[in-house]
Image (cartoon, rainbow, N blue to C red):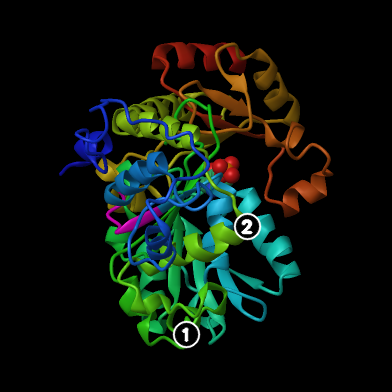
Amino acid sequence: MQKETIALHAGYDKKQGFGTMSIPIYQSTAYAFRDAEHAANLFALKELGPIYSRLTNPTNDVLEARFAELEGGVAAIAVSSGAAAIFYAIANVAEAGDNIIISDKLYGGTATLATYTLKRFGIEARVFKSSDASDLEGLIDEKTKAIFFESLSNPQIAITDIDAVVGIAKKHGVLTICDNTVATAILCNPIALGVDVVVHSTSKYTNGQGTALGGIIVEREGLNEFFKDSKRYYHFNTPDVSYHGLVYTDVPLPNFTLRIRLSLLRDIGAAQSAFNGWLFIQGLETLALRIEKHSDNALAVAKFLEAHPKVKAVNYPGLESHSDYKKAQKYFKEGKASGLISFEVGTFEEAKHIIDSVKLFSVVVNIGDSKSLIVHPASTTHSQMSEDELKVAGINPTTIRLSIGLEHTSDLIEDLQRALG
Ligand SMILES: *Cc1c(COP(=O)(O)O)cnc(C)c1O
């Protein structure tokens, strides 16, 4: 099935219940067992079914099945935010004494998680150059548990050399985790490129309207075999004393998401509400239409900016002049490059003036909304930093970032034209 069809139908049997066309919101904390044996079977995984909504929920089940199919994976697990999804994906394989290797171009929250929070738990983060992965192999040792990168990074709008990363990871038997939030499951499928685990912040394009926070983790088929005799991933093939000695690789269910559900979600509990799960299901129905439109609109705006005399540089990989243009053509559907653009103007004052002059763009630190968003990092999110500190953080005082929405491009361009003066 094609993605447009999967996004509308996968994972739901409408003959269930009352035949509701809209997927029911199962707003229930817990689920009644038929009898003692049923309860025992569920806990022993002899029978599958809902126990308690921290672990599973029938509304979220539909989202998970749908998302897994859309990403070309075998199973998924929905959690309460993208940040939680990233933490769980890493904590599922790494513990004190281990290391992970992260891309030099990452979402700010992921970079601080890896650099500061995971460090407090004894997990070291090593940084590799994602543009060509030339330094990646030298960073791997027997304690390396994952390589983490973004297909299309936020906020740098850079594309990882996925083939190079996957080649090195496979050679050394190290798990790859790709954050596919910005490219979306429609434009890019990292699993088809050889990646093991895909994570998303569903708060962004999947939701599409800025109405809920969520995250999801998808695993590829065949990870059970990958973990089976692996010394590196011994947690999966030795007894889990916290789950009465369960050996995950003995269970014929997708092991990566199973272990997150049975241990991390059980113990840490960043569970997604059924209502938010339902909102993401609504979002998925139109994701394919929207992301193509976001991409087409962004390309039109990027071309306008590139031709404007006051604009010094435009960062959008859909532009032929962009250094990642070839990667966009190779990895993304029809070379479409999603909705994020950044551009440089002459001075800090000019940048501030633009932010204060736009009328259609909202000044918001979010992405993926149907409405266009604008942000000037140097005067907002990074305003406490000195010019020198900004340089170290890679924030140029003259950079403006846009998340292009679904408005008509002529209105967006007119708004920017007026603001640029
Ligand atoms: C927003 C974002 C996250 C974090 O997701 P939340 O849902 O806000 O927790 C992670 N990665 C990327 C690329 C993002 O854009």
Residue type at mark 2 is: Ile
Q: Position of residue 376 (x, y in %)?
A: 67, 31
For the residue pair 171 and 281, the one nearer the viewer reads as 281
Q: Is residue 353 left or right of residue 35?
A: right
Tell me the distance, in whole angstroms, between the alpha carbons under discs 1 and 2: 22 Å
Is 325 situated above or below 403?
Answer: below
Q: What SS does tag 1 mark?
A: loop
Is 297 situated above or below 120?
Answer: above
* Range shown magenta: 71-76
Q: Residue furthest front?
A: 35
Determine the residue positioned at 42% across, 29% down. 298
Q: Position of residue 379 (x, y in %)?
A: 76, 32
N-terminal label among 1 and 2:
1
Determine the residue positioned at 47% across, 16% down. 412
Q: Is residue 18 magenta?
A: no
For the residue pair 60 and 43, the one nearer the viewer reads as 43
Q: Is residue 285 left or right of residue 79?
A: left
Q: What SS does tag 2 mark?
A: helix
Q: Position of residue 399 (x, y in %)?
A: 64, 36
Residue behind mark 2: 268
Q: Is residue 72 magenta?
A: yes
Q: Are marks 1 and 2 in contact (CB under 8 Å)?
A: no
Residue type at mark 1 is: Thr
Q: Residues within 10 Å of mark 2 (few under 14, many from 20)?
A: few
Q: Position of residue 171 (x, y in %)?
A: 37, 82
Q: Is residue 383 left or right of residue 63?
A: right
Where, quadrant-wise, is the N terminus in this rendering? Answer: top left
Mark sitting on residue 238: 1
